Image (spheres, rainbow, N blue to C red):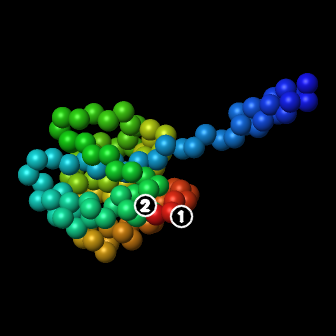
Amino acid sequence: MALIKTLIVLLIALALQPAAAETYLYMAEEDGCSWCAKWDNEIAHIYPKTAEGKTAPLKRFDLFSDKPNVTFKNRVRFTPTFILVQNGVEVDRIEGYPGEDFFWSLLTMMFKRANIPLDPTG
């Protein structure tokens, strides 16, 4: 009987735990986008290894043919556009690619504004 009570308490405690938020960085791109290619050359290979990449894995979509299941604040007009999404809803974005140094600074500010802590293992 004590074992059953313990299991019930554990199950209730697990049920009350907040669900982990699904966080992603979406990248809107299009064929022939030179700034997308520049981002690919400078950042794409590094991003998954960073705290940002571990916290918000990258998901790409073609601006003109893909329709991600995301609620955007505004229509995406430029490529690349980087959209920080949590639980299917946009929380912030970077329009364009300002270069490697500015990209990381702007990305860090997005996480801070959204109160999304970075994965410390990144």
- Give the secondary structure at mark 1: loop
Amino acid carrying mark 2 in the image: Glu
Residue ranking furthest to the bottom: 101
Amino acid carrying mark 1 in the image: Pro
Quarter of the image where one finds residue 89: top left
Left or right of 66, for residue 19: right
Left or right of 45, for residue 14: right
Residue ID for mark 2: 52
- Give the secondary structure at mark 2: helix
Q: Residues within 10 Å of mark 1 (few under 14, many from 20)?
A: few
Q: Provide residue 119's location: percent of width, then percent of height.
A: 51, 59
Quarter of the image where one finds residue 10: top right
Q: Which mark is residue 120?
A: 1
Left or right of 37, for residue 107: right
Q: Nearer the viewer, mark 2 or mark 1?
A: 1
Q: Provide residue 33's location: percent of width, then percent of height.
A: 12, 54
